[in-house]
Amino acid sequence: MYLKNNIRRLLVYRQCLLKLKELGFEVIYSYNLGREASVSPEQVRKDFSKFGIKGKRKAGYEIDHLLEALDIIFKKDKDQNVILVGMGNIGKALSNYKGFAQHKIVICAAFDIDPSKQTKSYKIPVYPVEDISRIVKMYHVKIAIIAVPKPAAQEVCNRLIASGIQGIINFSPTNLKHPKNIFINNIDLANEMESLIYFTLNQ
């Protein structure tokens, strides 16, 4: 859990650094970045130290150096191919999301059991689910997105893992069973909204 929180903070730091660079800043101190990211300066230094990123106490951190180091950590030296299973409303929205390109994330293919969706004109090619293994190998894919109805999610998950997928973002409202060496992020939009409603109405 600590590493996951650490990674999330690094992503927040990166967003803050990009904004500060656009504003013309070249150097930043841990207390500046901590204020932007809503964490303590000590936490910023600990997070950077964990990944070998060093600054100078009086001179601070060069923003370009930090961004280069973070790009290496998040493998941003090249495009990362991702596949998408399920071309319903969520799947279509994800396939059209332009923000992925800014982070060098490329949804290279989608899959759906509906033959009509395989012949429609989308921005990305849509294949039958039986082609998952072939496409995974062709594009050297390690990450997949599941956006299928709940009853089909576990079967899709099993197929993806058998095809060599190692990380999954799951938009289906169910917890998937998987080996310990497979990383899965569950995103249940309804649960997130209910959680937000609870904290908003009970503060």
Image: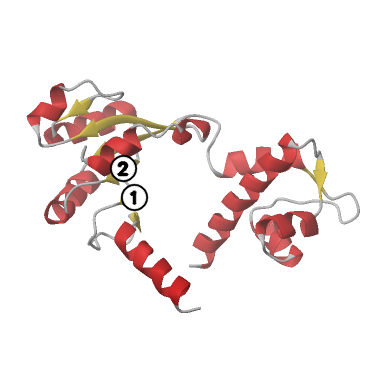
* Residue 161 image point, x, y percent: 24, 48
Q: Is residue 141 above or below residue 36?
A: above
Q: How is the image coloured?
A: secondary structure
Judge whether residue 164 can be spotted in this image: no
Q: Give the crowd class for mark 1: few <14, some 14-19, many >=20 residues within 10 Å.
A: some
Question: Which element type, helix, strand or loop, lies under badge 1?
Answer: strand
Q: Is 100 displayed left or right of 50 in the figure?
A: left
Question: Which element type, helix, strand or loop, lies under badge 2?
Answer: strand
Q: Is residue 77 above or below residue 46?
A: above
| Tag 1–tag 2 contact (CB < 8 Å) | yes
User: Furthest residue to the left?
Assistant: 115
Q: Residue at x 68, y 41 (%)?
A: 19
Q: Judge by depth and name the residue closer to the eye, 91 or 79.
A: 91
Q: Residue at x 21, y 40 (%)?
A: 88
Q: Judge by depth and name the residue closer to the eye, 57 or 122.
A: 122
Q: Is 7 displayed left or right of 152 in the figure?
A: right
The three-letter amino acid code for the residue at tag 1 is Ile
Judge whether residue 3 can be spotted in this image: yes
Residue 104 marker: none
The three-letter amino acid code for the residue at tag 2 is Ala
Q: Is 105 displayed left or right of 136 in the figure?
A: right
Residue 144 marker: 2
Task: Give the image quarter of residue 123.
Answer: top left
* Location of mark 1 (residue): 169
N-terminal-most mark, 1 or 2? 2
